[in-house]
Image (cartoon, rainbow, N blue to C red):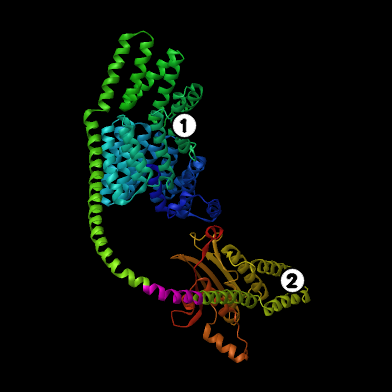
């Protein structure tokens, strides 16, 4: 969990934000394509951005992440670009943690911390300490990891970064849990929960509740553990995949303890799904196989973890893998190998002060020497086992857990009592009100019966009249809507437009410009085909509307010899394939901009169509750098043109009907654009559309 938070902070510094979590291959290709033409510090930043995208993709892209981060580091170091060095070093630290290489990761995190300290940037120093602590945790140096992350918390407190404090606090609780210091893990999880609730930080709320649940599981109170796991599930952790996988893993452990292996396997599969490289989940699956007696399957996973992590990695998982192998070889009576793995696990656990692993190793050695008929050795390790177990699950720790549960139960009971008192008060008020109501009812019953007979006939007649009237209005409305749709389509793709298109094709043919004529005719046929298809539909997706608009603008460009350029843009939060709107809604506005604004302009024209989303309304802004409305009207009057195009007005009527709002101007506004000197430099049309989503239409 700490890796994700740290990497998110680094990516914010790079300006790629949280969207780097979903690597877009097209954007990645664009970034790579920019490399040959980018130099200096910009190139180092670009390489770091590419590395970040690969790192967010996880283990499947970790090698690419290392490659680009290393090149970024070399480039930044060559330029003595401190910021670039820092970011590249953090990237390398994070991706090496993904590959279970904390020893190498620590070196890069410490380098990044040193660079940040030289730059006197406390935020980056804090993040550097945070990453170093993460790597120390993975290496199994629990005490040093806690000290280092606590140092980062001091910086975060000085900087007022509450969310980072919450995250780092939760990480310390998890470290204590891995170490087997459940009392400290429980206390700090409570503190982390309070911070997370204050910030409404869903991920850390889930993790804090899970850690408290684990504390109850460790003292054998499975009912309370399940209660806290359910509280965690109530925060919808599946919206944060890694938090959901952690909760699923802990539920699998709980059901495994209870012997409900089908449920345990279900949750282990949930944890494993989408995160096949998780060594923690692999360990749980191996434990599951061992409990079910599938020792060959368990041995294969334990062995893989043992060899993968032997050179370095998550040391607590490495110790559990050795203990699992020791149990299997003891069961097979391969005492030499069982003894080797048990002692190796115990030595490493004592070196790291991992009390839980010490307990498990001593328990295994007790059983081993008891089987070998060596009571002295067996008793020695049994005493160590008991002492470690009592230290982990002290009476003080149990008391704190029970007190915590008592407080929670008292709060529930108090709430229940308050609800009962309120319900009693409401019932008393209802009884008094019912008595008064009965008296009034008896007195007015005769009057109501008399009046009802008189009014009944009038009501029946009124309803019939209203029904007829509403039916008439509905038919008129549907007729008007259909009429407007057809008029608008005819106005948008009118004979005048078709004539102009065919004339242009003829002109190209007469000039022996066969290639242009063919290109124009191809675009024209595609446009006519789309119009004929979409004109039969009440709604089409924005993607199709843009395609028709693009074809129309390309034809106009070709006809007017590229006298203008155009662009169609929309924000990332718009999904063109999911937004539904009436067909051919935007073409009349673009036609108006070209014919009345750009065609009379001296110099090159520019037409822009931009989409954005605001308050569930799709906003479309059509901008041109033409001559403006006043001058266009003057030219029109001098030319003697008397026929007024109805395309804009009909489209506005359609828009009002579709938006279910008669105030058309609220959704359609045309304004002139002025430059710094107050001169008119173009026209801007603002259109608001209360779109429908395709999912709703399908439903």
Q: Taking the image as drawn, is residue 405 in sight?
A: yes
Q: Would you say 107 lies left or right of 154 here?
A: right
224 relative position to 562: left or right: left
State the image coordinates of residue 477 (x, y, percent, origin top left).
Answer: 55, 75
Q: Earlier in the sequence, mark 1 or mark 2?
A: 1
Q: Secondary structure at mark 1?
A: helix
The residue identified by callout 1 is 262
Q: Is residue 119 visible?
A: no
Residues rendered magenta in the picture: 450-465
Instruction: Find out whether residue 578 is within the magenta segment.
Output: no
**Looking at the picture, how far across and down is residue 488, in whole percent?**
61, 76
Mark 2, Cα crowd under 10 Å, few <14 / some 14-19 / many 20+, is many
Circle number at residue 517: 2
Question: Picture coordinates of residue 605 (x, y %)?
Answer: 57, 76
Q: 402 or 510: nearer the eye?
A: 402
The residue shown at (52%, 51%) is 24
Q: Secondary structure at mark 2?
A: helix
Residue 91 is drawn in which quadrant? top left
Q: Quadrant of residue 183?
A: top left
Q: Is residue 462 magenta?
A: yes
- Check disc 1: other Cα within 10 Å, few if <14, some if 14-19, many if 20+: few
Depth check: 597 or 201 in front? 201
Query: In this picture, is 105 found above or below 304?
Result: below
| Residue 428, above or below 382 | below
Pointer 1 with pointer 2, Cβ within 8 A: no
Say whether residue 459 is left or right of residue 540. left
Please name which of the two marks, 1 or 2, marks the residue nearer to the observer.
Answer: 1
> Which quarter of the image is occupied by the C terminus?
bottom right
For residue 183, side relative to residue 689 (left or right): left
Residue found at x 37% / y 22%: 345
**Location of residue 331 with respect to 32 vertically, above or below:** above
Magenta region, main secondary structure: helix
């Amino acid at each position: 969990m700490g890796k994700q938070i740290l990497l998110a902070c680094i990516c914010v510094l790079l300006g790629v934000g949280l969207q780097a979590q979903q690597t877009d291959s097209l954007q990645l290709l664009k970034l790579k394509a920019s490399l040959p033409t980018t130099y200096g510090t910009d190139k180092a930043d670009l390489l770091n951005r590419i590395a970040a995208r690969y790192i967010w993709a996880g283990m499947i892209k970790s090698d690419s992440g290392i490659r680009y981060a290393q090149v970024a580091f070399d480039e930044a170091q060559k330029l003595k670009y401190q910021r670039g060095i820092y970011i590249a070093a953090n990237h390398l630290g994070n991706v090496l943690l993904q590959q279970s290489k904390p020893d190498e990761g620590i070196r890069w995190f410490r380098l990044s911390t040193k660079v940040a300290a030289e730059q006197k940037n406390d935020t980056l120093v804090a993040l550097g300490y945070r990453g170093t602590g993460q790597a120390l945790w993975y290496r199994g140096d629990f005490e040093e990891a806690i000290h280092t992350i606590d140092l980062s918390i001091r910086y975060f407190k000085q900087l007022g970064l509450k969310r980072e404090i919450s995250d780092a606090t939760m990480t310390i609780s998890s470290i204590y849990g891995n170490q087997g210091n459940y009392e400290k893990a429980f206390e700090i999880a409570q503190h982390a929960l309070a911070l997370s609730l204050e910030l409404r930080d869903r991920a850390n709320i889930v993790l804090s509740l899970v850690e408290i649940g684990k504390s109850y599981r460790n003292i054998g109170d499975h009912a309370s553990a399940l209660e806290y796991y359910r509280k965690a599930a109530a925060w919808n952790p599946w919206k944060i995949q890694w938090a959901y996988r952690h909760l699923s893993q802990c539920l699998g452990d709980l059901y495994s303890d209870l012997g409900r292996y089908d449920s345990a396997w279900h949750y282990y599969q949930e944890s494993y799904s989408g995160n096949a490289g998780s060594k923690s989940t692999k360990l749980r699956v191996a434990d599951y196989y061992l409990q079910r007696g599938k020792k060959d399957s368990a041995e294969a996973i334990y062995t893989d973890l043992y060899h993968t992590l032997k050179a370095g990695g998550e040391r607590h998982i490495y110790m559990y893998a050795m203990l699992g192998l020791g149990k299997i070889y003891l069961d097979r009576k391969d005492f030499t190998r069982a003894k080797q793995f048990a002692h190796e696990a115990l030595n490493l656990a004592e070196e790291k002060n991992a009390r839980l692993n010490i307990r498990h190793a001593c328990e295994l050695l007790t059983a081993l020497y008891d089987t070998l008929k060596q009571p002295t050795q067996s008793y020695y390790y049994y005493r160590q086992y008991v002492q470690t177990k009592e230290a982990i699950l002290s009476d003080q720790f149990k008391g704190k857990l029970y007190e915590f549960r008592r407080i929670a139960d008292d709060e529930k009971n108090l709430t229940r009592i308050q609800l009962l008192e309120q319900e009693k008060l409401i019932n008393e008020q209802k009884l008094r009100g019912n008595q008064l109501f009965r008296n009034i009812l008896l007195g007015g019953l005769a009057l109501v019966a008399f009046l009802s007979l008189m009014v009944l006939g009038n009501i029946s007649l009124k309803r019939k009249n209203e029904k007829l009237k509403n039916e008439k209005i509905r038919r008129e409305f549907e007729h008007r809507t259909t009429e407007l749709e057809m008029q608008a389509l005819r106005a948008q793709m009118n004979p005048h437009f078709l004539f102009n298109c065919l004339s242009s094709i003829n002109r190209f043919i007469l000039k022996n410009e066969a290639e242009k004529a063919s290109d124009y005719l191809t675009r024209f046929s595609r446009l006519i085909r789309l119009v004929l298809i979409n004109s039969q539909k009440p709604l089409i997706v924005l993607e199709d509307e843009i395609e028709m608009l693009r074809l129309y603008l390309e034809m106009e460009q070709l006809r007017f010899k590229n006298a203008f350029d155009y662009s169609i843009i929309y924000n990332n939060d718009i999904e063109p394939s999911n937004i539904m709107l009436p067909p051919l809604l935007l073409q009349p506005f673009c036609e108006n901009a070209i014919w009345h604004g750009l065609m009379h302009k001296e110099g090159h024209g520019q037409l822009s169509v931009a989409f954005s989303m605001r308050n569930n309304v799709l906003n479309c802004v059509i901008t041109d750098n033409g001559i403006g409305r006043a001058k266009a009207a003057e030219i029109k009057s001098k030319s003697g043109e008397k026929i007024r195009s109805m395309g804009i007005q009909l489209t506005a009527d359609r828009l009002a009907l579709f938006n279910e709002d008669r105030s058309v101007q609220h959704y359609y506004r045309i304004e002139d654009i002025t430059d710094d000197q107050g001169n008119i430099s173009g026209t801007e049309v603002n259109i608001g559309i209360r779109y429908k989503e395709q999912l709703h239409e399908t439903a």
